[in-house]
Image: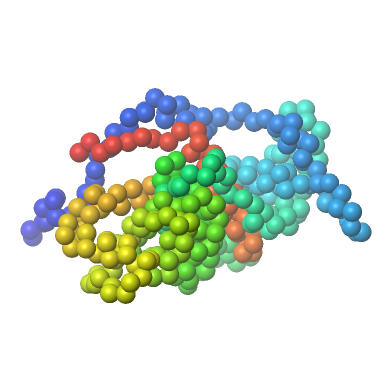
Amino acid sequence: MKYPKRSQYKHTKKLYRVRNWRSYEAGLRSRGDLTVWISEDAIKCWTAPASGKPGGQRIYANVAIETALTLRMVFHLPLRQTEGFLGSLADKLGVNIPIPDHTTLSRRAKKLAKQPLWVSAGNRPIHILIDSTGLKIHVGNRGKVPKRRAWRKLHVAVDARTGEVVASDLGSNRARDACRVPALLEQIENPLASATADGAYDTEGVYESIQAGGEGRTVRILIPPSHGARVSRRLSFALRERNRNIRSICRLGPREWHRWSGYSRRSMVENTIYRYKRIIGREMRARTLAGQRAEMRIGCKILNTMAGLGMPNSYRAG
């Protein structure tokens, strides 16, 4: 049997070296630091103010619920253990705050799905990378996991400069990836400079939505067209970038176009999805869609916090 040459493999292992290894290594150690503190502002905002409406009043503010659920996802704890962990933590710190019980955490988690995920430091145009993946849902009271287990699609948009998740959405596994792009772009307040995605997003609606996010600026869109795609003769402003990609791929070839255009930067969003599944998990703990969306957004916030501690600055060495 004649084996193919190494150069003929579709995927070959590349050698990369990290430029900022010392600072990146310090950031990796900081991710395992168990130092926990509660700021004075968080203590003041821990309890919910009176709403002025008749009936029972909320005891805990959203910051208390989000803090407890963040600890739960970081340490992979059930809700009852989360309640005990947060109570013992408050005792060790000598902080007199009420601790939400596990039923309150389960009920209030559904209200956190609309909490902001990413706050921009300015109004600079950003470069985003878009991708999606599947997450398994909770099987409920079944003793045995079914063979065809249901799952949902997690859609994320990542800032190409910082590696932070700037938008996220959770939808059905039957929905096409392209139809969730407008929901992602609505969460981004900054104008877009460029957008990169894989071939599943090669639709006219995606190009139009991304160009509208440029706020009058021309947005560079890097989406590989489908096999056999031809240049469109329609004078559509949104399809100019698609025609440009088709001509460039025909002139350079797909592999060289990936390197020349900067499409290879899309590996950062794939790395973000890999980090989500390794750190947060491949399965969702909530049973309702609202709870799963809140869980997903908290998980993305955790990744952003870890990315802020340090990210590698690597280059290809071979």
- Outermost residue toward the left? 2
Q: Which of 121 and 184 lies nearest the eye of the viewer?
A: 121
- Say which residue appears at 17% left-offset and 56% top-offset: 252
Q: Is residue 101 above or below residue 290?
A: above
Q: Position of residue 195 (x, y in %)?
A: 39, 55
> Would residue 73 be seen by someone viewing this image from the given angle?
yes
Horizontal and vertical percent for residue 103? Answer: 75, 54
Please tell me which residue is depicted at 71% across the width and 44% down the height of the picture.
Answer: 63
Residue 144 is left or right of residue 209, and the answer is: right
Q: Residue at x 32, y 62 (%)?
A: 241
Q: Which quadrant of the view contains residue 75?
A: top right
Q: Identify the residue at the far bottom of this view.
A: 234
- Residue furthest to the top: 22
Residue at 73%, 36% in the rendered image: 42
Based on the displayed image, in which of its 4 quarters is residue 144 positioned? bottom right
Spot occupied by residue 65 in the image (x, y as percentages of width and height) = 71, 47
- Return the residue nearer the eye: 279 or 56: 56
- Whether residue 134 sits left or right of residue 60 in the image: it is left
